[in-house]
Image (tube, grey):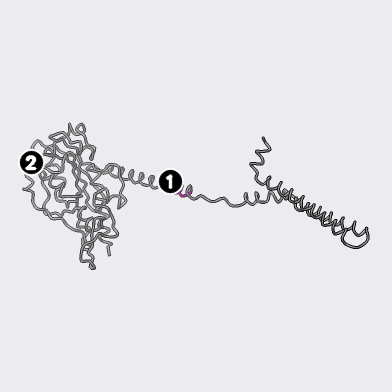
Amino acid sequence: MKTNKARIADPGAKKGLFNMKKQKKTRIIFLILAAVFAVGVPGSFREGIAAVMVCLLLTALFAYLGFKKPSAKKQAAPKAASASAPAPVNSQPLEDHSRKNHDAARASFIENKQQDFSIALSQIPRVDIAVSEDKPTRKAPSDMPEIHFTNITKRTHIDKLFPLVVIDTETTGLTPRGNDIIEVSAIRYEEGFVPVSCFTTLLRSRNPIPAEASSKNNITDDMIKDKPFFSEIAASFSDYISGCNVVGHNLPFDLKFLFVCGATLPDKVKYYDTYDLAKRTLVSSSSKKWDNEIGASVPVDDYDVEDYKLETLCDYYGIYRTDAHRSLSDCFATAKVFERIIDDKMNKE
């Protein structure tokens, strides 16, 4: 059984046996030819014997050369050549390793930036907030004075931006009617973008916070149950922002809530909306350009940002933080975005 398996496994063995039979027949033919040659060729008997011997020697030599096996050195040569040949290189593991290193380095970088942001925010001095018993009544949105927002250009005098306050609110809904401010913050800058103080507090609402609002700002009813209503700190907040230029992201939203809930908005100051300024400075994916060939507006080929949300602008300008949608963090991030937009405006050709 082993012999059969070996033959089946090595087709060359069968081929070698066939060659042996073929070579044997060849020798017989040579011998016959030699005998004919010896008998048929005239000459002495000694010459005939010599001719037969020569034929036998030639036949033996032919058989030897035909069945000679390659030397071990020659047999091993292909293996050695195969072993020395360079194996194909798979670059995928190297690329994956490089990508993992890059991702890890970027994650570490972002984490460090987030920590820097949190530390800087925690170091801003907080002002004491006076709670007043004189509660202003809510106002109608229609009574709000018209407010014009100022653009930033190369001719803007940066020193005239100050003093300024950056404000932000967190609310229970999107419209003032039936909704409340549940957190309000402001950061004050006197000269340059170095914060000098901040005003921040959670606030109680008249109704439970909707789940949709809580999922966005992470403020719960338990967090605000012992806090004052906005009406109780409206005077203190109004005093804090008085006389300052005002900055905010989507600022009309915050101003409307503040006005309706009882705050006094500064007059004879300038208002800067970073949402509007970003639209004037950066190209978004929804922006369009005029195509003279077809005489219509078409989507832009290249753009800076997907949209003008505060988080999108923070990503664009490399501002990293962990507590988005909390009013004090939003104020600090908005101030940094405002500063970067000013730089873009001033350096834009």
Q: Secondary structure at mark 2?
A: loop
Q: Nearer the viewer, mark 1 or mark 2?
A: 1
Place of residue 77 in the rendered image (x, y in percent of width and height, measured from the top left): 68, 51
The image quadrant where one finds the C terminus is bottom left
Label count reads 2
Residue drawn 66% across and 41% down? 7
Q: Tell me whether the residue at label 1 lies in contact with that at label 2, contact meaning CB atoms closer than 8 angstroms.
A: no
Residue 27 tag number: none
- Residue at mark 1: 100
Identify the disc placed on residue 138.
2
Q: Nearer the viewer, residue 40 or 15?
A: 40
- Residue 115 screen position, x and y as percent: 33, 43
Q: CA distance from mark 1 to mark 2?
A: 55 Å
The secondary structure making up most of the magenta span is helix
Q: Does the magenta run of residues contain 98?
A: yes
The answer to whether residue 119 is above or below residue 284 is above
Q: Is residue 302 left or right of residue 103?
A: left
Along the line of sight, which residue is nearer the eye, 298 or 36? 36
Q: Answer with mark 1 or mark 2, whichever residue precedes in sequence.
A: 1
In the image: residue 47, left or right of residue 202:
right
Quadrant in which the N terminus appears: top right
The stretch in magenta equals 94-99
Disc 1 residue type (three-letter): Lys
x and y percent of residue 176 in the render?
12, 43
